[in-house]
Amino acid sequence: MGCFTKFSRPNNTQHAVSGCRVDPKDYMLTGLKDVTVGRLSGKLNGQQFVIQECENCNIYVFDHSATITIDDCVNCRIVLGPVKGSVFFRDCKDIKCVVACQQFRTRDCKKMDVFLCCATQPIIESSTGMKFGCFQYYYPELAFHFKDAGLSIFNNNWSNIHDFTPVSGENNWSLLPEASAVLDFVPAPDSESEFKSVRISSDPSRSIVPLTKGGRRKDSEESCLFVFFAGEYTTANARKMIDEATAKGFVLIQTKEVSMRPEDVKRVFQNSAEDLVEWITKGPVIALELNGDGVVEACKNIAHEVFSGTKIFVSDNKNTSSRDVDSFFNFADMQMGL
């Protein structure tokens, strides 16, 4: 017969763990300085986690969790595996981090560099010197942790920041330079730590989350909408399409994975809707916006050569492709409450 234990967490949260008696300290890091610490895969298994009052630490959480709060930390480098709920930084300063979560929020923070994957609109409050880049990271269990946390690698609003307390004439946040390399901000675990055996990579081509341009200015006025309808290999096909297009010099602007109803299909795809309605019944669609001169013709060629027989939609010509992109992503943002 097993047992079920509850124990109190900071901030009046409850932390439930199935199994025998557990130590609350396993789910928190407190008052540490000048050390490399964290949790390996399987140590949290979807539970809550707390990091507080740490200084000059390298912190690696290579697992999925329910929520994570980070309070009163200074000069730390932090990697957080996928978080099903919220990541909340409070009263932190000089933080460099890699974060994947459903909700991201900061309050009373200064000087943070964040490589982010966030399913909803990130929020900063009473925070200054905030810089954001697109999540670029890999470790062997990361794809499974995204699935366990209920997060889609294609729903990333990293550059769509909402400043809850804007100051007239000042910018509290900005985007990191496009060429920013994650390991220049958050180093790999050192060879003396317990994390030395974790095979990590920040190469954009290996990142579990696709590297998107986000809110940066587009290089071309021509964009193309490419949509994969649900099937056995939808995610793999979308990744292959991204690789094919970027290898030809085109740029991935944004991605979305979202469910559609028949009326949504008719509104978004208009003249093409009749052929597509039956394809939405098996699950969400994955959409890509690709950008660059000649991208529409190139995408049509890739669709014919690589994805013949696959259920897809691709913009037909560059005169209407911008409308395709706007129609789909405006719908997706409304659907997701953005």
Image (cartoon, rainbow, N blue to C red):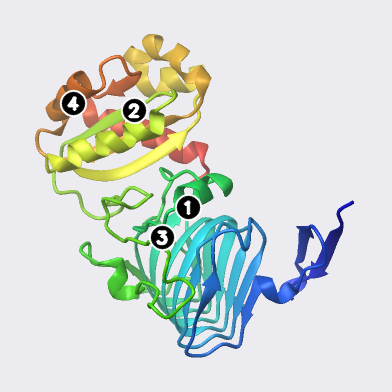
Question: Few, some or many C-alpha atoms within 10 Å of disc 2 (few <14, some 14-19, many ≥20)?
Answer: many
Q: Which mark is residue 227?
A: 2
Q: Compare marks 4 and 2 and give the one earlier in the sequence.
A: 2
The Cα atoms of the two marked residues, 3 and 4, are separated by 30 Å
- Residue depth check, mark 2 versus mark 1: number of the one nearer the observer: 1
Question: Which residue lies under the disc numbered 4?
Answer: 302
Task: Give how far across and how far down residue 39 sits, in percent.
Answer: 56, 69
Q: Which mark is residue 116?
A: 3
Q: Compare marks 1 and 3 and give the one earlier in the sequence.
A: 3
The Cα atoms of the two marked residues, 2 and 3, are separated by 24 Å
Q: Is residue 241 left or right of residue 269?
A: left
Amino acid marked by disc 1 = Glu
Question: Which residue lies under the disc numbered 1?
Answer: 141
The Cα atoms of the two marked residues, 2 and 1, are separated by 27 Å
Name the outermost residue toward the top: 274
- Residue depth check, mark 4 versus mark 2: number of the one nearer the observer: 4
Residue 31 visible to the viewer: yes
Amino acid marked by disc 2 = Val
- Give SS at disc 2: strand
Question: Few, some or many C-alpha atoms within 10 Å of disc 4 (few <14, some 14-19, many ≥20)?
Answer: some
Question: Few, some or many C-alpha atoms within 10 Å of disc 3 (few <14, some 14-19, many ≥20)?
Answer: many
- In contact (CB < 8 Å): disc 2 and disc 3: no
Q: Compare marks 2 and 1 and give the one earlier in the sequence.
A: 1
- Give SS at disc 4: helix
Q: Which residue is nearer to you in this view: 43 or 94?
A: 43
Looking at the rendering, which quadrant does residue 302 occupy? top left
Answer above or below: position of 216 versus 242.
below
Q: Which residue is nearer to you in this view: 13 or 289?
A: 13
